[in-house]
Every structure is written in structure tokens, then in C-alpha cells.
Amino acid sequence: MLIGNTFSFEIADSHGYHLPEVSLELIVAVCSLFVAVATVWLGFLKGPDITLYGSPKFDMKKIDWSEIKLIPNAIQFSPAQLIFINEGARSGAIRLETFLRPSKEFESFFSKHSCLFKRDNEPIWRDHMPYISIPDRESRIIEVEITVEFHDWKDYFDSEPVSKNEIQNILCQADDRNRKRFSDFCSMLKLGMHIGEISIDSMQTMGFFRGLRPKSLLRRPIGNVDQEVIDGFKLCLTKWGDIERYRILKIVQVVDANIDSFLQHPLKDLLARIENKGPLQEFKSDFWYDLKRSIQGSRLAEKLVDFIFKSYALESKIKQFGRQADRFNDDLQIYRRMGEDLRKKEVKKHEDLLAQSSALKEEIKDLLNEIKSLRNVLGSCVPPTTRD
């Protein structure tokens, strides 16, 4: 029906009832409203929409096997470029996290993986990446460089404490066990196997309210073992005796020398000073920490010291001596600050100090006997070329 310049429609339902007339202008207005809402949604309310484009490549870097001075214990990958485009209508932020699960064959040799993140000319972020902003309708390229680390082939030592009688055997055979372990690794390598599976996830802003939400970006196997890698590691096995020969036994000798310098000799000097100058002298108490500081930074030496001293039950004894020496030193300081007259009255205090000093002297003697016995064991753990 035409009413003036306006079209209207009369609609009947299935029962013949007539519904209110709908004008064409109303239909056009409703359609325009939907278009406007869609435009606003796509143009503003949609929020950030950050998407990974393409398929980044994780290619293993080549190893120069021609001049091997150390057996490689890490596989490095060339930086992979991850391209992100924000197709939303508002700026957003993103942070990446990497995970690497070693293949079953590599699990017993795997130590950890590390990651470097880089964007344009900004500083490199190691392992932990901050949030970066991506404006709407713009893109960002983030480089991800993965390194897979195995346990040290020569420095590997992972033994629980044992009885005193077993220490020598464990230490003297440690280098041979590492060679056997590396030989098993070389035998395990097969053409076409993968080192592990890399996963890259993100925390990124999404939606109108731009809330942070996790998102899985990619999962794929990486580290395709080729013949060059297999031959390279097998070449290292043939040169095992030429590369840092008897590595663990040599570090055992270093530990033995440090025990002499930072434990045995200082204890002897302390005992001599107490015997020469009288019992009411301060006792040095930080022998254990001096020894630990002397090997700080050498993971192998730290592991060996922990194993040796826990097996010999010496760590707890040395620490206990230190605590008792500190208590004695505190009591001695209080006693010395007393006036002359007060000290004469505090006879029991004086007797207690003498008793403490005497007990500490006996503990020093016991420790020295234990350390002497321990050093005899370590003295027998020497490389074959230095044995008589």
C-alpha cells in the first residue's frame, strides 16, 4: 500500500491474522542500524586481534667438527622469525613463552633448553620476554633463538652419598662411566630422529576489554638428526682420551688441595694457637664456608664436595663445630666485657668457658683425624699417568 511517499506492508500470519504494517523506511533504518553496529564492532569494539602468520623455521646451526677441543653439549638453532599482525581495531600486547620436551631417546641426556628473544634493535631478552605492544593494523617480528643443552659429557657427576668404603670406587670410575654414557648417546643417534618438540605459547590481550589470555601458537618437532651430526659425535668418541682426559679425577685433586688449604691447615693452626695462648681464645668458625667459596663457580667441584662430605658425614660435623664455636665466641665476648670485680665473682661462667673451650679442642682433633682419613682416600683417586 502506498501512503503518500511511504510504502507499507501488511503481513498476515498462518492463521490469517493481520500484523501491524511495516514501512519500508523502518526496514531500511533497521538494516542501517545493523550495518552501523557491525562497523563500530569491527572498527572499535572488536579490540586487538594478534595473530601469528606463516610457519617459522627452526634450523639447527652447523657445528665445526674439524677442530674439536671440547665435546659439544649443546645444539643451537638459527633464530626463527615469528611474524605477528594485529588485525584488530585497538592496540594490544603480547609475551611469548617457550617449552621444549625432549624426545624419549634424548630424555636421559637432556639438561635444559634456553631461549633468546629479540625484536628489531632492542636488547636481547634471555628466557623471559617482557610484553611488547603491537598497534592496530601493524605487525611485529620477534626472533626466537633456541638452544638445547645436554648434560656435560666430561663434567657429569650425579651420585647420591654412599658409605665411606664406596667413595674411592665411585670417584675412580666416574670418568669411565661418563665415557660409557657418551658411547650410549652416540649409539642411540639415528638418521631422521628429532631432538624434541618445541612449544610456543603466548599471553596476549584479546577482546573489547583487552584482557590477558593464554594462546597456543605452535607445536612441532625440531632438531632433525642428520648424518653429519651422527658422524661428528662419533668422531668425538674416538677422541675421548685426548679431550680433557681424566677430567673428574683432576678436579678431585683440586678439591683435595682446597681441603688442605681451607680446612685442614686452618684447623691445625687454630689448635696450635689455642694450645699456645691459652683456652680463652676466639675460635674460627667459618671453615665450611671458606671451602665452599674456594670452589664457587665450578659446578663439578661443588657436586664432588657435596658428595664427598655427605658420604663421609663430615659436612654436618663441620657445620655443628662452627655453630658451637660461634656460641663460645659470643659467651667469651660477654665475659670479657665484664668488669674485673664482676669477673672474679662469675667463677661458674669462667669454668663454663673453659669446659666449652676444652670440648671444642677435642672436636678439632676429631675433625682432623676424619679429614686425614678422607684425604688418604682422595689421594688414591688420581689419574693413571700420575700414579707411582
Image (spheres, rainbow, N blue to C red):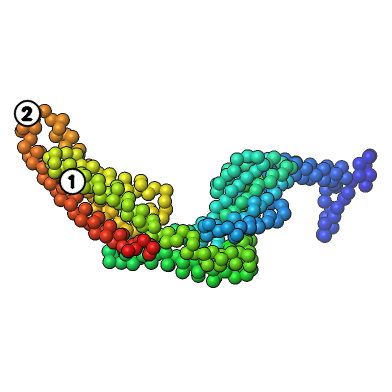
Q: Quadrant of residue 309?
A: bottom left
Q: Residue at x 28, y 61 (%)?
A: 377
Q: Residue at x 49, y 66 (%)?
A: 182
**Above/below status of 287 relative to 200:** above
Tell which of 98 and 160 is nearer to you: 160
In the image, which disc is placed on residue 104? none
In the image, which disc is placed on residue 271? 1
Badge 1 marks a residue whose secondary structure is: helix
Q: How many marks?
A: 2
- Under mark 2, the amino acid is Asp
Task: State which quarter of the image contains the C terminus.
Answer: bottom left
Q: Is residue 108 visible?
A: no
Tell which of 18 and 372 is nearer to you: 372
Q: Quadrant of residue 32?
A: top right
Q: Give the Cα distance between marks 1 and 2.
A: 31 Å
- Under mark 1, the amino acid is Leu
* Closer mark to the observer between disc 1 and disc 2: 1
**Residue most toward the front?**
388
Q: In the rendering, at what x and y percent does residue 299 appear?
A: 42, 53
Going by the image, does 102 lie left or right of 386?
right
Q: Residue at x 32, y 54 (%)?
A: 256
Q: In the rendering, at what x and y percent does residue 68 appear?
A: 55, 58
**Above/below status of 350 relative to 360:** above
Going by the image, does 73 lie left or right of 158?
right
Q: In the rendering, at what x and y percent does residue 369 appear?
A: 20, 56
Q: Is residue 368 visible?
A: yes
Mark found first going from the N terminus, 1 or 2: 1
Q: Which residue is mark 2?
A: 341
User: Local crowd at mark 2 within 10 Å, few (<14), some, or many (≥20)?
Assistant: few
Q: Residue at x 87, y 42 (%)?
A: 25
